[in-house]
Amino acid sequence: MMPASLPTPFQLISLDSVGSTNDEARRLAQSGAAADLLVVSAQSQSAGRGRRGRAWVSPAGNLHFSMLIRIQSLHHAAQLGFAAAAALVQALSTLLPPHTFQAKWPNDVLVEGRKCAGMLLESAGSDWLVLGIGVNVVAAPPPQGLNHPACALADLDYAGDAAQVLEAFCAAFAPLLVAWRQQGFSPIRQAWLSCARGLGQPTIVRLETDTQTGIFAGLDEEGALLLDQGASGSRRILAGDVFFPDAH
Ligand code: BTN
């Protein structure tokens, strides 16, 4: 991709092909070369990682990057995944009107119900969050073996490139990060819930060992999904795959 031109205070390192940009960013943090809001992007990844141990198909033309964010403790770091998802929804909505982008718990971005982007949050020591984001710009993974339908921005006739998506993301993310640092999770939760898929709707969550159903009632302080199970009460879900039975 053409090197992106990022607004201050973001800095960019553009690489050709790497294993995983999350690993490159972590290496920089561990070697003392990290800076707050340093972005490491790569044309392609040979060992891109998704959530829950899955692979992330990462061909040239798609967007793969990891942002180093200085944090004071890991305790609330997961909240930044919701800020990033809300920012990416805003950025893509600006680039591709009139398509409807939504956030899907925990950190996916959907367009008209199909996944076009995902995020993987990892830590590098206790001072750094590695926010890894992949956006299907030119190609979606083949449908075999996917839990959810996927799509690429090119399927929506997007004529821009990955660099433009990165620039738009940074512009949308900057004010949310400032809000988070000054006011905590409340404005982030509000931003995320306002673009979330399935709020108040029947929801199925596939966990490691079982499946839970209920009404998707919101997010708690740690970003856990709150599932209202009627007479059985409310359940907090910290990791799982979400499905909406009415999805078509
Ligand atoms: C998911 O939806 O499962 C998360 C996908 C995260 C992919 C991105 S691409 C850039 C960064 N490097 C990786 O190896 N993974 C993340």
Image (cartoon, rainbow, N blue to C red):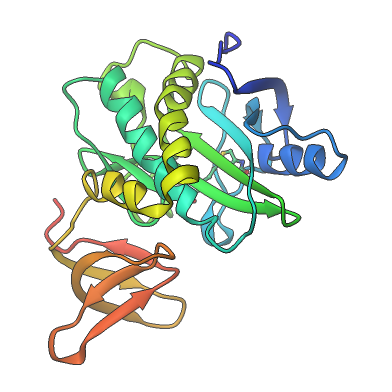
Instruction: Find residue 35 and report its image quarter.
Output: top right
Q: Nearer the viewer, residue 48 or 97?
A: 97
Which residue lies at the image location 52% right of the left edge and 38% below the top edge? 133
Question: Quick one: which residue is furthest to the front in this view?
Answer: 182
Which residue lies at the image location 20% right of the left edge and 67% below the top edge? 217
Q: Nearer the viewer, residue 33 or 248?
A: 33
Q: Position of residue 100 (x, y in %)?
A: 19, 33
Instruction: Find residue 41 and report its image quarter.
Output: top right
Instruction: Find residue 20 and report its image quarter.
Output: top right
Residue 142 appears in view: no
Which residue lies at the image location 35% right of the left edge and 26% below the top edge? 91
Residue 216 appears in view: yes
Viewport quadrant of the N terminus: top right
Count every numbered label the image shows and give the total: 0
Vertical placement of residue 163 versus 127, above or below: above
Q: Position of residue 157 (x, y in %)?
A: 28, 16
Q: Is residue 162 left or right of residue 19?
A: left
Which residue lies at the image location 13% right of the left edge and 63% below the top edge? 201
Q: Position of residue 183 (x, y in %)?
A: 41, 48
Q: Nearer the viewer, residue 58 or 231?
A: 231
Q: Is residue 19 left or right of residue 199?
A: right
**Splitting the image into four quadrants, where does ligand 1 fall?**
top right
Vertical placement of residue 67 versus 205, above or below: above
Vertical placement of residue 111 versus 62, above or below: below
Vertical placement of residue 234 versus 105, above or below: below
Q: Is residue 184 left or right of residue 97?
A: right
Q: Nearer the viewer, residue 179 or 191?
A: 179
